[in-house]
């Protein structure tokens, strides 16, 4: 099987065990790519441990200061200019059996797409919260939509997960996504989304929506992500970063503010279902609203 002219960029920080698991899985699928670029901002250097894995493919390790947008930009800067595709991959991804070969075949048949995402599978969704999002009033107000992968006038995006068929979308998450290098070689992830970089993938991909973004439903993956977020800081970012996105792309501020109220309502529902961390997250949301109003 002929190798794809594809380079994988993996940003990582202090998660050597998860990264190793991902790299060893890719070892079994090295027909899919030509090189992996690991952009590591860990507190301790991991080059020795990674070299001991005796990986059978070409890889490069770049040490970086922390920041997911900054790390992805560093990886993109080091991609060979003759590459046809660039894949952004998180360090905690678990692909289902044959997902990579299914993506390989898809790219062979659809070479002109600007971006192609793998299909994220999430089994334990909060059905009550998800049902609220489908109310007609919410769609009418421009807050949310019942279509997959849609960016609404409020700046909130709908999820595109557990898909049963291929779907064109407005945005793609960067957990496991492939872009045409020619379409993104002059682009950068916006570092104004901060150290945590919440919504940086929405920003990056939404600017390409008219060039063709699609999710391959047959290429499935899940995430081992068990990152413990600071609920206050994350709640703050939910508001501040979303507001920045709305302003940047000239979306509707009024719909965004109504969306913030529904967000806080959702967090209250989750708080009363015995998830105490959501109270602190609500405080972060409220501080975020104060911050954008000053």
Image (cartoon, rainbow, N blue to C red):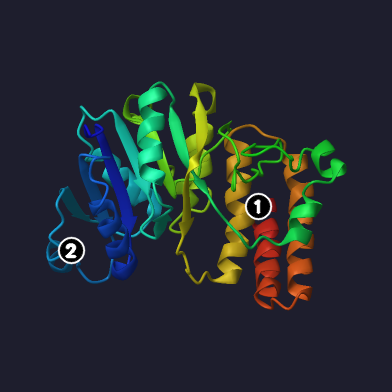
Vertical arrangement, residue 262 with respect to residue 136, above or below? below
Quarter of the view holding residue 272: bottom right
Mark 2 secondary-structure assignment:
helix
Query: Where, by quadrant of the figure, is residue 180 drawn?
Result: top left
Residue at 53% over, 48% down: 199
Residue toward you, 75 or 70:
75
Query: Decide: marks 1, 2 in contact (CB < 8 A)?
Result: no
The residue positioned farthest toward the right in the image shown = 137
The residue pinned by badge 1 equals 292
Residue 87: image location, x then y, percent = 34, 41
Task: Pinpoint residue 256: horizontal percent, then vertical percent.
Answer: 72, 44
Residue at 69 percent of width and 76 percent of height: 275
| Identity of the residue drawn at 18% across and 63% down | 50
x and y, in percent, of residue 210 in the image:
54, 23
Q: Which image quarter is the N terminus in?
A: top left
First-in-chain label (1 vs 2): 2
Q: In the structure shown, which secondary structural element does the residue marked by tag 1 occupy? A: helix
In the rendered image, is residue 187 in sight? Answer: no
| Crowd band around label 2 with a 10 angstrom C-alpha radius: few (<14), some (14–19), many (20+) | some
| Residue 275 seen | yes
**Mark seen at residue 185:** none
Image-based side of 204 in relation to 183, left or right: right
From the viewer's side, name the closer residue of 110 and 145: 110
User: Which residue is the site of mark 2?
Assistant: 50
């Amino acid at each position: 099987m002929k190798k794809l002219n594809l380079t994988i960029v993996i940003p990582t920080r202090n998660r050597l065990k998860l990264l190793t698991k991902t790299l060893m899985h890719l070892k079994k699928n090295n027909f899919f790519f030509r090189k992996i670029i690991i952009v590591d901002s860990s507190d301790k250097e991991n080059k020795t441990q990674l070299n001991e894995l005796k990986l059978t493919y070409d890889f490069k390790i770049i040490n970086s200061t922390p920041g997911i947008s900054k790390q992805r930009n560093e990886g993109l800067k080091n991609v060979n200019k003759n590459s046809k595709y660039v894949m952004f991959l998180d360090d905690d991804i678990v692909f289902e059996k044959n997902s990579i070969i299914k993506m390989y075949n898809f790219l062979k048949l659809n070479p002109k797409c600007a971006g192609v995402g793998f299909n994220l599978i999430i089994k334990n969704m909060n059905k009550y919260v998800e049902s609220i999002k489908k109310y007609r009033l919410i769609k009418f107000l421009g807050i949310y939509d019942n279509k997959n992968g849609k960016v609404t006038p409020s700046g909130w995006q709908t999820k595109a997960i557990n898909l049963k068929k291929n779907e064109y979308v407005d945005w793609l998450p960067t957990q496991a996504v492939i872009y045409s290098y020619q379409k993104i070689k002059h682009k950068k992830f916006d570092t104004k989304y901060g150290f945590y970089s919440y919504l940086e993938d929405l920003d990056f991909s939404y600017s390409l929506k008219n060039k063709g973004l699609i999710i391959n439903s047959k290429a499935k993956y899940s995430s081992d992500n068990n990152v413990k977020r600071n609920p206050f800081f994350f709640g703050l970012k939910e508001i501040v970063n979303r507001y920045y996105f709305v302003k940047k792309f000239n979306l509707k501020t009024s719909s965004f503010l109504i969306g913030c109220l529904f967000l806080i309502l959702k967090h209250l529902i989750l708080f009363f279902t015995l998830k105490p961390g959501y109270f602190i997250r609500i405080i972060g949301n409220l501080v975020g609203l104060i911050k954008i109003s000053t």
